[in-house]
Image (cartoon, rainbow, N blue to C red):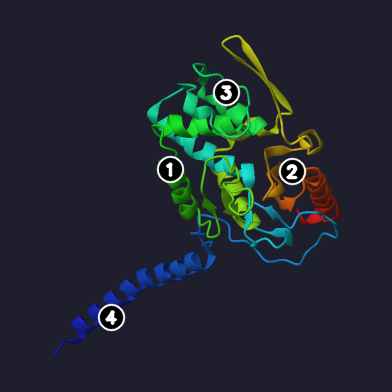
Amino acid sequence: MMNKFETLQKRELLILVFSFIIPILILGMIFLREKPETNLLAEVVPQETERVFNVDIKAKSALVTELNTGKILYSLNRDEERPIASITKLMTVLIASDKFDKQEISRLQIRENHLNAFGDSGLIVGQTWGVKDLIDFTLITSSNDGAKALALSAFGEEESSFVAEMNSLSRKLGLTNTFFSNVSGLDINLDTEAGAISTASDVTKILNFIVKNKIDVFKSTVLNEKFIDIEGNIYDAKNTNKSITEIPGSLLSKTGYTDLAGGNLAVVADFGLNNPVSIVILGSTFEERELDIKKLYRETADYYASNLFEY
């Protein structure tokens, strides 16, 4: 049996221990309660919202999205699979630029098999192009030859290997309704088979990835025109998106058109305070695609103007 002195010592020891433990427990509870939640998602999850625009467009599908929040401002058949034509070149350039960077290749030579794609953009066999110049030229003018030259030069003349890489990256980005068959987006069969299939939702994910990871590679897409000197040959690269000068804050732009696809156009514009918004339209017409984009841009600008104090 413990004597009175030992009992007193034990009691004092317990009091001392609890005097340290209880404050620590209380502080821990406060810390856990006040600690902000950590977002473990790599990509912003789209938030459903009611359509806020009352606009008449020719496109068969469209999507307007805040890239930082995932908030959808306008949606029309956004998950409907459609041919995307030359919007494909966004993925082509993404992969080619990454390969050239890793291999530290800054220049490439145009070869005869680079020029087999439909549409003569003026490239000449034997020319040496800077990779950056050819990327800019390909994106601005939507050059099919340029896309093929980039792809084949990056992957040792094997287009099928490059296309496999495009589809691999597509899966990594969670593009569940996207499939590429070539590097340009040209129709394989003018009646039935497209060069690439995607949706407005998936194209938005591509734009989001570019803006957050590779926007410097695509800066030329918002230029109205760029002159490129290649061995004394001056190429006047004019933007296939003729409405680009009417879209303030533009960060990124890419057109697309084939017989199967109709008129496609994807743009990203900053609406102030680092608020990039993507606007994607698929299945319009060659003439109406730019009108559709401008309508949706104006509606977006009006939306923010009327909800100024929320942003």
Q: Amino acid at mark 2?
A: Gly
Q: Amino acid at mark 4?
A: Arg
Q: First in sequence: mark 3 or mark 1? A: 3
Residue designated by label 1: 160
Q: First in sequence: mark 4 or mark 2? A: 4
* Image position of 222 (left or right of 23): right
Image marks 3 and 1: residues in contact by CB distance under 8 Å: no
Please indicate, yes or no, whether residue 273 appears anywhere in the rendered image.
no
Q: Is residue 234 above or below residue 177?
A: above
Q: Amino acid at mark 3?
A: Asp
Marks 3 and 1 sit apart, C-alpha to C-alpha, by: 24 Å
**Dot 4, crowdedness within 10 Å: few (<14), some or many (≥20)?**
few
Q: Position of residue 28 (x, y in %)?
A: 44, 67
Camera-side residue: 175 or 297?
175
Q: Position of residue 136 (x, y in %)?
A: 60, 28
Q: Position of residue 41 (x, y in %)?
A: 50, 59
Residue designated by label 2: 272
Camera-side residue: 106 or 31?
106
Q: Nearer the viewer, mark 3 or mark 4?
A: 3
- Of the 4 image quadrants, the one containing the N terminus is bottom left
